[in-house]
Image: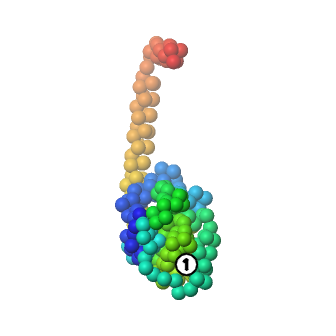
Amino acid sequence: MYIKDGSNESYMASDVNSEIYSVANRMVNLSKTEKELAEEAMEHPSLANSYVSGKKLYMWGWLGNKVPNQKWSSQELKSSIVNKLEQIPEDCKVEFCCGWHDCEICNKNTGFNGSIYISYKKKAYCCPNGVEHYIKDHDYCPPKIVIEAILNGSPMSGYDCTMAFIKEHKRKINKQYRILDKERVEREENRKMRDIRMKRVEDSRTPEQKSVLDRWKKDTLDLI
C-alpha cells in the first residue's frame, strides 16, 4: 500500500466514527472509564484507538513498490535510525487488526503487521511496523522531519494512543455517550415495567391456574 510521505490523511479515516461509537459503547454498557480503556489497550495493543487525523498526523514509510529518491547524509545516521526503530517496545506497536503485509519491492515474506506512532512536537508520526526493512534493505531515507521525530520523539503505547484519540474526539464521544446512555436507561425502564407486568399476571392467577402452569413447565422440561 502506498501513501505519500507527509500525508495528513489517516488511511483509517473512514473508521473514526465506528471507533468513537466503540469507545462510547464500552463506557456506557461495560461501565469503563477513559483510563480503564487506555489501560486495557496498554495490555492488549490491538485494542488501542489510535486513529488521529488532520494536521495532527504525519504518515510516512508506506512505500508500496518503490523507494523515494532521497539519499542518506551518512551511514552512521542511517544506522542510528534503524537502531531506534528496532528498539521500539512491543507495547508501542498497535493496530494489528489491519492485516499482514509483505514487502512489495522485493516480495519477501516480511509479515509486517500493525503500525507505530511516534509523538513529536504535537504531531503523531505514523509508519508501518517493520519499516526498518525498507531502510536496511532498500536504502529508504525518510523525510528530515521524520528523522528528527525518530531521534527526539516518543513512541506511543496503546495507552497513549487511546488517550490521544479520546482527547481529540472528546466532544463526539460525549455526544455518542449521551445517546447510548439514554438508550440504556430506556431499556432498563422497559425491563422494570415488563417485570412489574409479569408479577401482576403471576399474582392474579388462581391456585388452580398456578398448578396447571407448574405441571406444564415440568412436562416441557421433561421433553427437553
Quarter of the picture holding the N terminus: bottom left
Q: Residue at x 40, y 56 (%)?
A: 18
x%, y% of residue 112? 52, 61
Who is closer to the viewer here, 28 or 198?
Answer: 28
User: For the view shown, which residue lies furthest in the bottom direction?
Assistant: 73
x%, y% of residue 93? 56, 64
Which residue is labeled 1 in the image? Answer: 150
Who is closer to the viewer here, 162 or 222?
Answer: 162
For the rendered model, the colour scheme is: rainbow
Disc 1 marks a residue whose amino acid type is: Ile
Q: Residue at x 52, y 76 (%)?
A: 139
Does the rendering let one see residue 24?
A: no
Does the rendering let one see residue 105?
A: yes
Is 47 situated left or right of 182 in this image?
Answer: right
x%, y% of residue 113? 52, 59
x%, y% of residue 71? 48, 83
